[in-house]
Image (cartoon, grey):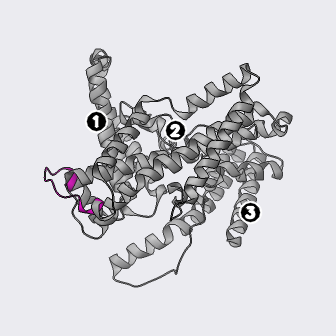
Amino acid sequence: MPEFTILLLASILWNYWIGRKISSHDPTGSDPVLRSTAKAWLIAGVTVDLVLLAYFKYAGFFVANLNVALGTAWSLGEIVLPIGISFFTFTQIAFLADAYQKGTKEYRFVHYGLFVTYFPHLIAGPVLHHAQMMPQFREANTYRLNFDNLATGFCIFAIGLFKKIVLADGISPYADAVFNAADTGYQPDLLEAWIGALAYTFQLYFDFSGYSDMAVGLSWMFNVRLPYNFNSPYKALNITDFWRRWHMTLSAFLRDYLYIPLGGNRNGALQRYINLLLTMVLGGLWHGANWTFVFWGALHGLYLVANHGFQALCGERCSALRGSTTFKIFAWGLTFLATVFAWVFFRANDFASAQTIVSAMLSPVAGAQTALWNQGLDVGRGVCYIVALLAVSVALPNSNTIGERTAMLVRRHCTWPFALLGGALSLCAFLVAINATRDSVSAFIYFNF
């Protein structure tokens, strides 16, 4: 929509101007007056950014809850969420925070506009930092054709496209069948509930990591390296490790610009746990205007508190235990199951649907898998698909490793770039042809956030 382009431009102009105001007052200097003024500009800039985000993303949610609490019928009409507003807002908030804390400056509006609107990341991330991108934009070699980078980037892009079209979209009917049926009041049985939950667990991962790979690969073709956003999160042995691997740029943003400013772990264990919980609740709310997202964030906050509490309680006494294979398998299984359980609330439209699926997951009652049968889905095939996706997630090297190894091989062998480029182009054309034969269009899940 044209008005959203104007909105993006206005956001860029505002944050660029605020960034100039902050840097002009020497925020890292010794003058307390200048630093105080710079902080005031920072607060003003971030406030406007958050108000804008809150209106488009949360105003309807706030009014709906107010109507329930007060028995009123207020309405703001239909508010359309601009695609990518969360990502370009967070990117610019990070720039303002870095301008205040680190003295980051950007004098040229064209460069700043390129930093915010750089198209591979704009729609669904990763969240970028000014210091990561501007040195690359200033390099003359960035604007010259590089066949090595073109071939490597196309390979990474093809991997991401494969993840989306074959893996994520392939398993999504099983997740949709169970969760959509639960929305209507249908009670799945034990097997059906677990198939639905696990199907969504892998659908979300391969959908979002597929997009991130496509963004990284596309950017690599233009000689620009974006930060990786995933590092095999389902290999994590505890929930802290999971958040170091899942949506890594958002995790780093929440740590650097929310958890640490709240006090981090500097004010004792209790305050640390409160900060962790609050950070994850707000991280959940960032994903969408629904109490299920808030609960999902709170659940992960409790997971983190429990993990840190266990680490503090165990201390050095458990060092030998952590090295044992049995403990690692148990830790992996517990982390994975806790993550799957939480994803149910992330996917469900409301608590009633989530409770329906969770209760079925915990019930030993077997049934006829009617929801899957009604959609023409075979239970055995679904189980095999889930097992295969689990194996891909935990046993194979991730796309980051594949990309780096490919880049190394391309540099060593002069004929590889052309062979890889041809293979990647052929695979992409094949995948696009497959996608074109489908009845419905499958958008990336994180476009909604």
> 98 or 182: which is nearer to us?
182
Name the residue that disc number 2 marks: 230
Is 371 part of what is drawn in magenta? yes
Camera-side mark, 3 or 1: 1
What element does badge 2 sit on?
Answer: loop
**Does the image show residue 317?**
yes
Q: Earlier in the sequence, mark 3 or mark 1?
A: 3
Structural distance between the alpha carbons of marks 3 and 1: 46 Å
At 26% from the left and 21% from the top, the residue drawn is 326
Q: Disc 1 marks which amino acid?
A: Leu
At 39% from the left and 57% from the top, the residue drawn is 173
* Segment tinted magenta in the rendering: 360-372
Is 186 part of what is drawn in magenta? no
- The image quadrant of residue 149 is top right
Name the residue that disc number 1 marks: 334
Name the residue that disc number 3 marks: 9
In the rendered image, the vertical position of residue 58 relative to residue 230, given as above or below: below
What element does badge 3 sit on?
Answer: helix
Task: Name the main secondary structure of what is drawn in magenta.
Answer: loop
Q: Disc 2 marks which amino acid?
A: Phe
Q: Residues within 10 Å of mark 2 (few under 14, many from 20)?
A: many
Image position, residue 75 (x, y; %): 47, 82
Q: Earlier in the sequence, mark 1 or mark 2?
A: 2
Structural distance between the alpha carbons of marks 1 and 2: 20 Å
**Does the image show residue 32?**
no
